[in-house]
Amino acid sequence: MKRRGFTLLEFLLVVTVLAVLVAVFLPAVTRRHHRHPRINCINNLKQVGLSFRQWALDNNDKYPMQVSVTNGGTMELVESGNVYVHFLVMSNELNTPKILFCSQESNPKRHAATTFASAIPPGTPNQVPFTNDFNVSYFVGVDAAMFLAGDDNWIVRGMSVKRGLHSLWTNTPVAWTKDRHVNQGNIGFADGSVQGLNSQALARAFQSTGAITNRLAFP
């Protein structure tokens, strides 16, 4: 019996169908690939927000940035621009510094810390102490206003934000860089909620903070 092969028309039809299927399903697969680490980041910021709130409950309803160093806070350290200090004083509430590091962190100089202990016991070479801003992926809103913490991959006035303390007007042009969460990011608000925002939504949220300026410390 003579076997019949594909005609050119049938072959082209199969190729077209496969191309359509790839075009339909590949974006969905890509979105799922990026969604998982973003969900982890949202969970991190939810825990960060809860830790801020727990700390405040023990300190007259004030966050570390509003409490003097002599009373266990970080008020006098705000102007230094360091971010890690605000998290360090909440080590008991945070439990682990791992939640301060985004799984899609792209800065090669940064690395996740594994312990808040300042000294690593002998025989534990895999332990990484939490000692500086290279162990952090999130900014801190030092005025504890609407924006409390969030992804630090901001573009401010068209340029990637530099580390340190920034006083930004509510109409300052802000957006996300492309190197984390695919042009999106996560913000932890002072009310305990966490929202995933694109660049347009970030700008709108920033404009609605209600403050003339927002002081944000970026690691």
Image (cartoon, rainbow, N blue to C red):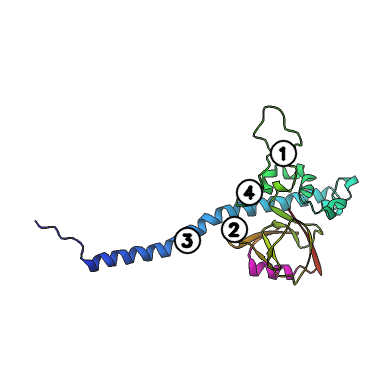
Instruction: Left or right? Give the position of 2 relative to 217.
Output: left
Q: In terms of sequence position, does the residue under pointer 1 or pointer 4 come before the other?
A: 4
Residue that mark 2 sits on? 181
Q: Residue at x 64, y 55 (%)?
A: 42
* Residue 48 point in image, percent of width and height: 71, 51
Residue 11 position (above or below residue 43): below
Residue at the disc numbered 1: 129
Marks 3/2: CA–CA distance: 15 Å
Quarter of the image that includes the N terminus = bottom left
Q: Secondary structure at mark 2?
A: loop
Residue position for label 3:
28
Is residue 9 toward the left or the right of residue 108 in the image?
A: left
Image-quadrant location for residue 98 = top right
Dot label at residue 108: 4
Which is nearer the N-term, disc 4 or disc 3? 3
* Closer to viewer: mark 4 or mark 3: 4
**Residue in the picture at 80% in, 57% down:** 142
SS class, disc 1: loop
| Residue type highlighted by circle 3 | Ala
What residue is drawn where x is 37% and y is 66%?
Answer: 20
